[in-house]
Image: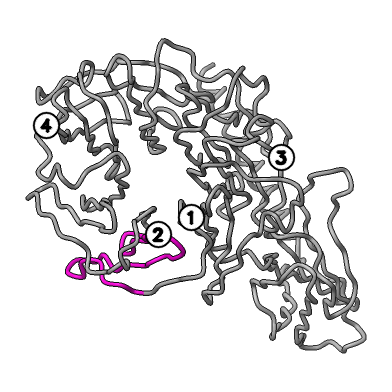
Amino acid sequence: MRIRKVFSYSTCCCLFVLLLLTSCYKDKGNYVYQVPEAPVIQNMDSIYEVFVGDSLIIAPDVKLKGSTADQLKYSWTIHVPPKTSSDTDRHYEGKDLRIVFGLGPRSFTGRFAIENTANGMKYFKDFTLVGKTAFSKGMTVLSQQGDKTVLSFIKPDGLVQPYLFEAVNPGQSLPSAPTQILAVPVAYQPPVASYWIFGKSGTQTGIQVDANDFKVIKTLKDNFFDAPQGALIPNHMFVHPLGVISGIIGDRLYNGTTSTWNEAPTYGMFGQGATGDYSLSPEMVFDYTGTYGPGNYIGFDQVKKQFLRFNLYGDATFFGPDYEVQGNSFDPKNVGMELMHLQQIAAGLCFGYFKGSNDSIYECSMDINFNGPFQFKALSKRPFARQDLISPSTLWAATASQIIFFSNADKVYRYNPINEDFKAVKADFGGKSVTMIKLQDQNTLVVGTEGALYFLDIRTGMDGTLLKKTEGLPGKVIDMAFREQ
């Protein structure tokens, strides 16, 4: 019985294969296809930059072998990401695109379509439109002229345009005693969308303006779901890569919400802040490179004199001194000194400058593992070698190669903590007090004084030689933001 079953099954399989081969043999269809040639498109780029309000003309030269001009039909589509119900894609007919560009200062994708009406074939070429304004590229400078806060814009050719805020926002004023300007990108995209300007006093201590026209978007108080009682004093604010801000207001840490659509009106607003028993110093480090969560903060409790950990899990979450300590140079959970400045060098390498009970200044270096498990390595503690150069008004900046720059009166010093080498930079600031130092990149340091900006070459061996100088700024420079759309 078993042999007969196998034979019967094999016989069926053979018959099926024979039928299949016979069927294939009888199918004498022609399966060789001739793909029509694609058109050759010339005089058309992949990216077009255009100022809002200017004419945009794209006039491609199209050649399609085997077709005549009257057989070709053309159309254009510009894709407009929806923000409101009225936002729809723009469609145009004709071989050339000739429009007045009014879609706004942002990037748009487009598609050029060619249809051969003789055979129904369609061909497409994609391109990108980058909408620009007069403020799309340059530097925005925050300065203080007497009791007045001023915003100026420096164009790529060096032209200074001062008093922009008053010109476009009549009757409104910027925060007094200005401290910071932050360039905030579009969420998930690099272009700068807005600026936040912060100060210590005034009717409003924080104002957000559109980066393209400097019109007010909202105030710091408007950025709270439920603003806390009393004055809102921003101490140290940061830009979050997802297009929101975070930082210390008063002595509490707040982070803009990113848990909704980035075009929603509530995106970036502050909740109640990180809950916990702490009183933050204005000095803090924000690191966004963690793999166990989208970001981490290291702060310092000015009452308990200890370093604190915050993680960014949608909102800032307080972990306090919940971290593993390695090294015994100092105790990060009980520093016992007043923090003057906390400087991030690169990744987790940081330097802290403290004033001890004897008024001596100490330098503490530390390596913080932001990526988890969370560890705090105390590397060194020593008296700062040039105590005479540090004061409460000292300003700081540092390169990733562990070179620290700091100000003292009308001088800027280059300091290498590895060998404790100090050198005054070569540039001369005309006896004016330094009011800002900031890295433009790892090779360029920008120094601000009364009425001027100095751009210094800080490459190895250059020791801060002057590259260029921009004058004509109102008052003393406090901060600046770079924009390269």
Cβ atoms under marks 3 and 1 closer than 8 Å: no
Image point 42% across, 17% down: which residue? 318
Cβ atoms under marks 3 and 4 closer than 8 Å: no
Q: Where is 362 relative to 478, above or below?
A: above
Q: Earlier in the sequence, mark 2 or mark 4?
A: 4
The residue type indicated by label 1 comes to Met
Q: Which residues are magenta?
A: 441-467
Tell me the crowding category of disc 2: few under 14, some 14 to 19, or many 20 or more residues within 10 angstroms, Cα based: many
Q: Earlier in the sequence, mark 2 or mark 1?
A: 2
Query: Residue under circle 1?
Result: 480
Q: What is the chief secondary structure element of the magenta stretch? A: strand
Q: CA distance from mark 2 to mark 4?
A: 31 Å
Q: Earlier in the sequence, mark 3 or mark 2?
A: 3
| In front: label 3 or label 1 | 1
Q: CA distance from mark 4 to mark 1?
A: 33 Å
Q: Residue 433: within the magenta?
A: no
Element class at badge 2: strand
Give the percent coordinates (x, y) of residue 187.
60, 44
Disc marking residue 263:
3
Element class at badge 3: loop
Tell me the crowding category of disc 4: few under 14, some 14 to 19, or many 20 or more residues within 10 angstroms, Cα based: some
Q: CA distance from mark 3 to mark 2?
A: 36 Å
Corner quadrant of residue 301: top left
Corner quadrant of residue 353: top left
Query: Residue under circle 4?
Result: 381
The residue type indicated by label 4 comes to Lys
Question: Which image quarter is the C terminus in?
Answer: bottom right
Disc marking residue 448:
2
The residue type indicated by label 3 comes to Glu
Judge left or right: residue 449 versus residue 91.
Answer: left
